[in-house]
Amino acid sequence: MKAIRLQQPGGLDNLKLESTQERDPGEGEIRVAVSASSLNFHDYVVVSGLLPTADQRIPMSDGVGVVEAVGEGVTQFAVGDRVLSTFFPHWLEGEPALQKLLDVPGDMADGFAAQTVTMSADGFTRAPLGLSDEEAATLTCAGLTAWRALMVVAKVKPGDWVLVQGSGGVSVFALQFAKAAGCRVIATSSSDEKLERLSALGADELINYREVEKWGSRATEIADGRGVDVVVEVGGPATMAQSVRAIAFGGHIALIGVLTGISGEVPTAELFQKNASIDGITVGTRAQQLDMIAAIETNGIRPVVDRTFALEDIADAFRFQESQQHFGKICLSI
């Protein structure tokens, strides 16, 4: 089979297409013919060398495909089943714990930039009905992160105000899930063109943060003068102060991304005065993924795919991600 391997010390020029031997499944494992994957910021920091991993690692955390062989003891899947990977193969349900968050594909273990993978059957769920391979492949990381932030941790309800930042995969999913739940959404972006597309997806209010520097105050005004119930925080240090300004008393800031850095100041006095909380969100469980899939099927939600690249063009896909021109997700067709 063909697979992409990352040669250390990393970097897009060190992503090499190679021939490698597929492996028959052992006890509790399945072999999957992979059809698509999607790019996440986590994948980018791995392939760029910012997050060190083993030499010759096969990257990519997300994958969808068809089961072509099952190992002894596997009962949940059969040959021919269409399956979707999970980000944390050991986090099946319950609260997070260190041991549950190990062996992330494409990082701590080989991932889905390959024509076939052989992994534990517990590391997959059924794939959603009615979505293309590329659409389905966007759900493992970005989709489930947004789902857990809104539905599991913040427990949004109809009428809540939700603020999403930008037009990347998590933010677009958060907008779609929030609207399906009956929430009102404020979307921010530096691009008027992207704001128009966010409006077409259902955003109720739009803020260009380059034109409105204190967008947190503007969001508070929009949200009935009391602030938003949930902020989906993907920026990190450069946006946190405005997120705290935007949040309502008793609200939730779902801390998901570090696009502007890994550390910074938090206006702690304003945060505790508002009795607001910041919750770190690292994707979710296998059980939550199944809930999300059911909701997507019930509500007819279609993931937004900007562009699809061939497996051998993976470096170009990441360069497109670097350009920040994309809206929604970037995918690989395998």
Image (cartoon, grey):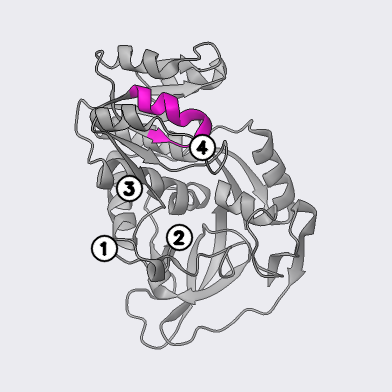
Amino acid type at image mark 2: Phe
Can residue 183 be seen in the rendering of this structure?
Answer: no
Q: Nearer the viewer, residue 199 or 299?
A: 199
Amino acid type at image mark 4: Gly
**Marks 2 and 3, how far apart in space?**
13 Å
Give yes or no for contact between labels 1 and 4 (Cβ–Cβ under 8 Å): no
Q: Of marks 4 and 3, which one's residue comes earlier in the chain?
A: 3
Which residue is label 1 attached to?
A: 94
Q: Which quarter of the rendering shows the N terminus?
A: bottom right
Residue 96 occupies quadrant = bottom left
**Marks 1 and 4, how far apart in space?**
30 Å
Q: Count neighbours of disc 1 (C-alpha within 10 A) and say few if under 14, some if 14 to 19, many if 20 or more.
A: few
**Marks 3 and 1, how far apart in space?**
12 Å
User: What is the residue that sits farthest to the right in this orientation?
Assistant: 13
Count the marks: 4
Q: Residue at x 49, y 39 (%)?
A: 169
Secondary structure of the residue carrying numbered label 4: loop
Q: In the drawing, what numbered circle is on residue 14?
A: none
Q: Nearer the viewer, residue 6 or 299?
A: 6
Q: In the drawing, what numbered circle is on residue 148?
A: 3
Q: Of marks 2 and 4, which one's residue comes earlier in the chain?
A: 2
Where residue 184 sits: x, y (%)?
28, 23
Residue 127 occupies quadrant = bottom left
237 inside magenta stretch = yes
Q: In the drawing, what numbered circle is on residue 87?
A: 2
Residue 121 occupies quadrant = bottom left
Secondary structure of the residue carrying numbered label 2: loop
300 inside magenta stretch = no
Which residue is label 4 attached to?
A: 264
Amino acid type at image mark 3: Arg
Secondary structure of the residue carrying numbered label 1: loop
